[in-house]
Amino acid sequence: MDQYAVFGNPVKHSRSPWIHAQFAAQTGAELEYGAREVELAQFEQQVLAFFANGGAGLNITVPFKERAHDLAQVLSDVARVAGAVNTLYQDARGQLVGDNTDGIGMLRDILQNGGVLRQRRLLVVGAGGAVRGVLPNLLAEQPAELLILNRTADRASALADRFRDLGSVRGGGYDLLTNASAAPAFDWIINGTSVGLSGGLPPLPTNVVSPATWGYDMVYGPGQTAFQQWCINNGAERALDGLGMLVEQAAEAFYLWRGVRPETAPVIAALRHALAAVD
Ligand code: ATR
């Protein structure tokens, strides 16, 4: 039976084993997908041992995505540009291939919800690993403008520099908004910070929201996240959470490994239902 797993630390709350079990059932695939909490010092060794023992594919989560990028022998374009890998497998020659499906997962979720990024003004909040992983796909949609804001301004400007060749991208601290002369409202506000995990909000002024704004929170919870509520309360047209992205990035990894694209809509609905039941 083909063996897959997600490696991370911590990893015990990962939904990936459940999601991949749904995909396997749906496509009639015989596979096992586990979650392994890997000690920080052991990551490279455990990845290599997993594939040496016949493992078919890995997902990589926090805090190992950059190390997975460094370990891979072959990188997809997106993984190379992002500097982070969330999916590993071996090619026909036995080389370790690293890809990153986070950005395509987010994009699919946005498109399936009827969202449009092309020629739109995007505000991305946060400049950590989560944001870095999705920027190549966001910029490939050719937004009119992409502004990255972060508490630590240097991280945002460094990220903007890294992606400058891919489009109109700027980065800095939250004060960039106060100093900006252009229209304050954005078509999209994407929250890639971790403040929501402790119930907080990124420190944005409310005038970045207009009735045409769509919010996107890269995290999710049983109900609406604090950031989704903030968007809606300030008049945004819609606000999505990261649950669809989670399922879509998993589906894309499943496709890379097995050449079969599972249906995501029923899995998103089932996960939404399961989360609400726990609430
Ligand atoms: P991840 O891999 O999940 O992106 P990360 O690299 O630690 O994790 O990034 C977390 C992001 O949330 C960063 O943009 C961080 O801002 P800093 O770069 O200034 O640390 C942001 N963040 C975390 N807590 C925050 C807070 N209380 N207020 C504002 N931003 C916060």
Image (spheres, grey):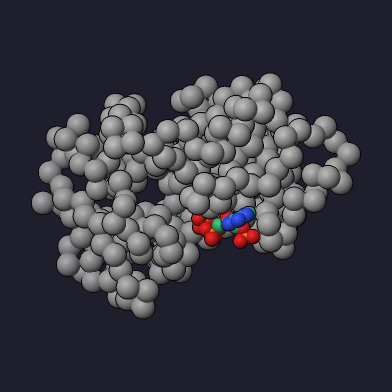
Please indicate, yes or no, whether residue 59 appears anywhere in the rendered image: yes
Residue 45 in picture, x, y percent from top left? 30, 75
In this rendering, is residue 46 above or below 276? below
Q: Residue at x 32, y 73 (%)?
A: 39
Residue 149 in picture, x, y percent from top left? 70, 50
Res. 151 image quadrant: bottom right
Task: Using residue 82 as the reference point, say whether residue 10 is left or right of it.
Answer: left
- The number of callouts visible is 0
Quarter of the figure that contains the C terminus: top left
Please indicate, yes or no, whether residue 88 appears anywhere in the rendered image: no
Question: Ligand 1 is found in which quarter of the picture?
Answer: bottom right
Q: Nearer the viewer, residue 270 or 230?
A: 230
Res. 214 image quadrant: top right
Residue 188 in picture, x, y percent from top left? 64, 33
Task: Using residue 259 as the reference point, say whether residue 162 is left or right of it.
Answer: right
Q: Residue at x 36, y 64 (%)?
A: 9
In this rendering, is residue 41 above or below 160? below
Residue 60 in picture, x, y percent from top left? 37, 58
In this rendering, is residue 133 above or below 211? below
Q: Residue at x 36, y 78 (%)?
A: 41
Task: Using residue 151 as the reference point, say whether residue 259 is left or right of it.
Answer: left
Q: Nearer the viewer, residue 67 or 267?
A: 267
